[in-house]
Image: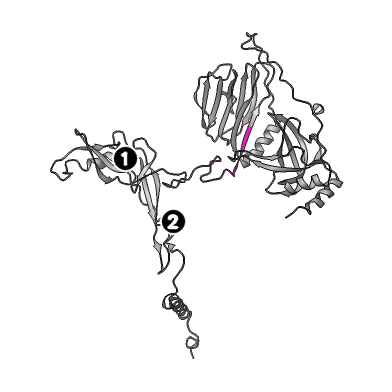
Amino acid sequence: MDSAHLFPRPRLFQNLLLLLWALLNCGLGVSAQGPGEWTPWVSWTRCSSSCGRGVSVRSRRCLRLPGEDPCWGDSHEYRLCQLPDCPPGAVPFRDLQCALYNGRPVLGTQKTYQWVPFHGAPNQCDLNCLAQGHAFYHSFGRVLDGTACSPGAQGVCVAGRCLSAGCDGLLGSGALEDRCGRCGGANDSCLFVQRVFRDAGAFAGYWNVTLIPEGARHIRVAHRSRNHLALMGGDGRYVLNGDWAVSPPGTYEAAGTHVVYTRDTGPQETLQAAGPTSHNLLLQVLLQEPNPGIEFEFWLPQERYSPFQARVQALGWPLQQPQPREVEPQPPAAPAVIPARTPTLAPDLCPPCPDTRGRAHRLLHYCGSDFVFQARVLGRHRQAQETRYEVRIQLVYKNRSPLRAREYVWAPGHCPCPMLAPHRDYLLAVQRLVSPNGTQDRLLLPHAGYARPWSPAEDSRIRLTARRCPI
């Protein structure tokens, strides 16, 4: 006997299952739940314009079973398409649309007019045309998709609405580039470098401020003094204010970006550049009077931060200063010799710190901190009203997020408590401090916080403390 007569074919089982499903959902009165499903997007249409800017559209359909809700999302997407510029003398798109009504009767009369675009009407995306030689305009409905909202505007009209393209090219998406240059990003692929340079030599001349590395974005430098900012390219040539000559304010090309240099009578100088830089730049100051502080900041891709730090350290940061040029004595208003800065308090002049020994103190700071780790202090730097320690992480006991091998730990004041000595190992409990706008992300060692010299005994104590934190 043929085996096909003994066993039903698989397709028969499939048909039976489909029939059962239909009975359950329709015959028994059980309605489908949830939204329908979209079909795949169709291909993008051709650009609405033959030159210049236009609009391309794609669509999809919603498939719904009885009782299902409408699909979530839009059935159409519009993107900006950019074609080669229109030739000189080409008639603008809106002018062409108005001209279609030339010589045709309108307004219910047999009168005809010559029409030109009128841009003073409320809705930019209506085809508002002015009758030449007359004091009235008429609206002929919507303009065609892809028409510019107004002369020189970035937005284009789509379905009667003026929309601008996001960084993803889609009109009306609202997508923006983050500070790292990523479309729709959250500033999590780059780091924000922000410092105040207060060091300088005691002679007039050029002094290095910072290296602005390749890939830097949203660069900003500012100061208020009679000194002048100078910028040197990777080839050793000055971009501005070099060779003892002051450049005029304006826009300068440097490292693949535009640098906007401003100077007012404040006196205030600023440098700003959107970036990204295509190679390293060296920021200097042409010193003529004591340096009150130069603020600089930029955003740097995470993968470029470690090479930047390594190069700075290899150069013995701050960078080796050039030999100062001898200058003629100047009047008091512009002294050639700069008086030394007032020194900050040395560690032995700092007041004593409060006693922070005991189990209660250790437990309080361990449980209330974001990070606890063993670290070696590589360096200490005082700036503004803070002290910054550079540390090398050796062992992590507690962390709320990943830590790099080298980190900066900040402490309030020039005499922080406790004071950490360079080249020694400590157990530290620190907090993560993020500014409200997200531009600063720091590790903070609180005043009178937990910072003990590392020892096997302290290691055992901190491990026992970890078990006693409330959940």
Q: Which residues are magenta?
A: 178-194
Q: Which mark is residue 69?
A: none
Whether residues under marks 1 and 2 lie with C-beta atoms below 8 angstroms apart, the answer is: no
Residue under the image location 62 percent in, 22 percent down: 285
The type of residue carrying mark 2 is: Gly
Look at the image and tell me whether residue 86 can be seen: yes
What secondary structure do most residues of the magenta stretch adopt? loop
In this rendering, which labeled residue sits more in front, label 1 or label 2?
1
Amino acid at circle 1: Pro
Q: Which residue is mark 1?
A: 122
Q: Is residue 183 left or right of residue 113?
A: right
In the image, what residue occupies the spot 46% across and 68% down?
33
188, 54: nearer the viewer? 188
**Quarter where residue 332 is shown:** top right
Q: How is the image coloured?
A: one colour
Which quadrant of the structure image shows residue 83? top left
**Label 1 – label 2 distance at C-alpha:** 29 Å
Which comes sooner in the sequence, label 1 or label 2?
A: 2
Q: On the rendered structure, is 352 left or right of 434?
A: right
User: 49 or 237, which is in the foreground?
Assistant: 49
Residue with the mark numbered 2: 73
Q: Residue 202, percent across and down?
A: 69, 17
Query: Which secondary structure lies at badge 2?
Result: loop
Q: Does the rendering let one see residue 240?
A: no
Callout 1 secondary element:
loop
Q: Quadrant of the C terminus?
A: bottom right
